[in-house]
Amino acid sequence: MALYNEIQVGRFNRFIQKLLSIKGGPPMPTVASDLQIGLDINSGAENRYLEGWDLFGNLFTVAAFAGNVAVLGLRNPVGSNVVAVVTKAIVTTAIANNPALTLFPLGSAGALVDQTNARTARGLDPRGRPASTCVLTDSSGVATVAQAGGIVIDQAQMPITSRVEFMQLLELPLLPGTSIALTSTVVNQAAQFGFWWRERYLEDSERS
């Protein structure tokens, strides 16, 4: 008996084919007994390493600098062959501020720009890589490097001496050639900025 592609919503066939790098025709040709894939095996951060993910993060005090705002940037370099997923962005300030979380998409000028000071990301799981592929920089004590083409995706209204965590329940993919930045809106003010994220190498099927 000949098989035919009974599934009308092709994106699910494509998802399975891409996810598992299946060659040839549709991996799910009919619904009934053939529709049997099950992939929900992640039970927490302790299994991320087993899935090929490395966990990173750090928190920094960005010093006050006259006439400039504080910035912490996280950039995924062009050609890195890595996908990063930002899971938390942390801001603590001593005076009222409205810090912004800005995404610099592929093709924007800001996605290729680093701040002046290099910072070191720390591995949060000793089973994984100790060094991150993404580039972490800030403007501590130096003039802020201009970034163009950004999209403000979140902004906080912070009173005196307060802390905000962006993306507590969300995750933001950061593909090669894109970046993200935390930026204060008050000049000459010190702030504590931090990111948590995970990284893994892109599969062949994800690059097409």
Image (spheres, grey):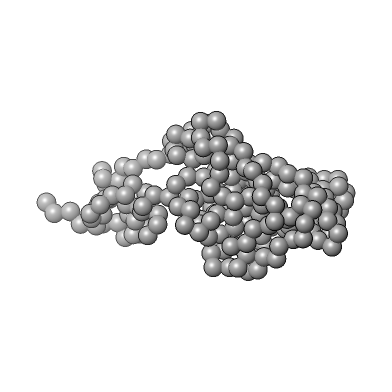
Q: Position of residue 67 (x, y in %)?
A: 84, 62
- Of residues 139 and 31, which is closer to you in this image? 139
Query: Quadrant location of residue 66?
Result: bottom right
Count of marks placed on residues: 0
Is 143 located above or below residue 165 in the figure?
below
Identity of the residue drawn at 60% across and 68% down: 109
Tell whether 35 sits left or right of 65.
left
Query: Quadrant location of residue 101?
Result: bottom right
For the C terminus, the image quarter is bottom left
Q: Position of residue 207 (x, y in %)?
A: 40, 57
- Of residues 122 and 180, which is closer to you in this image? 122
Is 206 located above or below residue 122 in the figure?
below
Identity of the residue drawn at 77% across and 45% down: 61
- The reply to whether residue 76 is visible in this rendering is yes
In the image, farthest residue toward the left = 1
Identity of the residue drawn at 73% across and 44% down: 60
